[in-house]
């Protein structure tokens, strides 16, 4: 997972859970099971209570195994949270079905409402990258006194893939920013008309996020490539970006004065 995300304090995550509707609504939905479960314990027969407890233990163990796998394999906390919440909702709905089908139906409706009215928040930091408008980017690329290289992320935070990858680019900017290489982000959700100018097809969601490396104002590399069907998340994103754009080489050339 990303370094900045790993170092976030517990207080930060508690504050974020309270302030973000996405996290708060999920917490309330999960917490609602506790009073329902306590009430059911007084109504169920000993045999049915034992059966329910057995299913709860099975669900908890399965969830812990899946969460442990995800925490090792997932690159960002945003992606880890999205996956674990998805697993938790499935297991909770299954347990609710054991309690009463009406409770399972209530959870299905509640999770659908949460999906409609809220969205998982993206990573809030920018690292050393700059939030740019298309006009600002054009100005920076055409001025002769700016960085020799500009690496720009084009994204839209209404798309889940951009939210899940939102911490990668800030981490890369902290590691590789120099006087020769600068990083910037353009939100195509705010400026959709700029997509065509940079060769990005917004009708194909796998095109976002798109990363473009400019050299002296000209495009020298793009990921994913235009009209490519390859998915960015088939590989670890940070390593994929470093390898594709040769960021290590650019940094070494700068250190060696080339």
Image: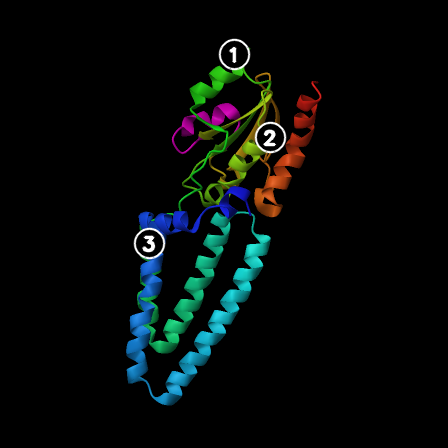
Q: Which residues are magenta?
A: 187-201
Q: Give the crowd class for mark 3: few <14, some 14-19, many >=20 residues within 10 Å.
A: few
Left or right of 177, for residue 155:
left
Determine whether, in the image, residue 10 is placed left or right of residue 18.
right
Q: Which residue is mark 2?
A: 176
Asked whether residue 256 appears in the rendered view, the answer is yes
State whether residue 65 is above or below residue 258.
Answer: below
| Residue 15 in the image, given as x and y percentages of width and height | 35, 48
Horizontal relation, residue 238 to residue 165: left or right? right
Q: Residue at x 31, y 79 (%)?
A: 40
Q: Which residue is mark 3?
A: 24
Tell me the quarter of the picture where residue 66 sits.
Answer: bottom right
Tell me if mark 1 has few (under 14), some (14-19) or many (20+) residues whose alpha carbon lies within 10 angstroms of its own: few
Q: Position of residue 189 (x, y in %)?
A: 40, 34
Reading the image, the residue beneath label 1 is: 143
- First-in-chain label (1 vs 2): 1
Cα distance in 3D space between marks 1 and 2: 22 Å
């Amino acid at each position: 997972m990303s370094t900045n995300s790993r170092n976030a304090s517990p207080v930060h995550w508690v504050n974020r859970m309270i302030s973000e509707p996405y996290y708060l609504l999920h917490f309330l939905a999960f917490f609602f099971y506790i009073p329902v479960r306590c009430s059911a314990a007084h109504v169920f027969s000993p045999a049915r209570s034992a059966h329910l407890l057995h299913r709860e233990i099975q669900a908890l163990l399965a969830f812990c195994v899946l969460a442990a796998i995800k925490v090792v394999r997932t690159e960002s906390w945003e992606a880890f949270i999205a996956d674990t919440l998805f697993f938790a909702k499935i297991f909770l709905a299954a347990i609710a079905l054991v309690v009463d089908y009406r409770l399972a139906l209530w959870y299905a409706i509640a999770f659908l409402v949460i999906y409609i009215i809220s969205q998982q928040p993206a990573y809030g930091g920018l690292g050393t990258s700059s939030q740019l408008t298309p006009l600002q980017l054009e100005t920076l690329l055409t001025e002769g006194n700016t960085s020799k290289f500009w690496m720009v992320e084009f994204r839209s935070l209404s798309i889940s893939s951009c939210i899940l990858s939102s911490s990668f680019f800030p981490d890369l900017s902290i590691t590789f920013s120099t006087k020769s290489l600068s990083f910037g982000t353009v939100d195509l959700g705010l400026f959709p008309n700029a997509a065509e100018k940079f060769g990005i097809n917004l009708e194909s969601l796998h095109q976002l996020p798109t990363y473009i490396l400019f050299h002296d104002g000209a495009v020298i590399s793009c990921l994913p490539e235009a009209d490519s069907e390859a998915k960015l998340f088939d590989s670890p994103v940070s390593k994929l970006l470093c390898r594709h754009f040769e960021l290590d080489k650019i940094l070494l050339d700068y250190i060696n004065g080339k």
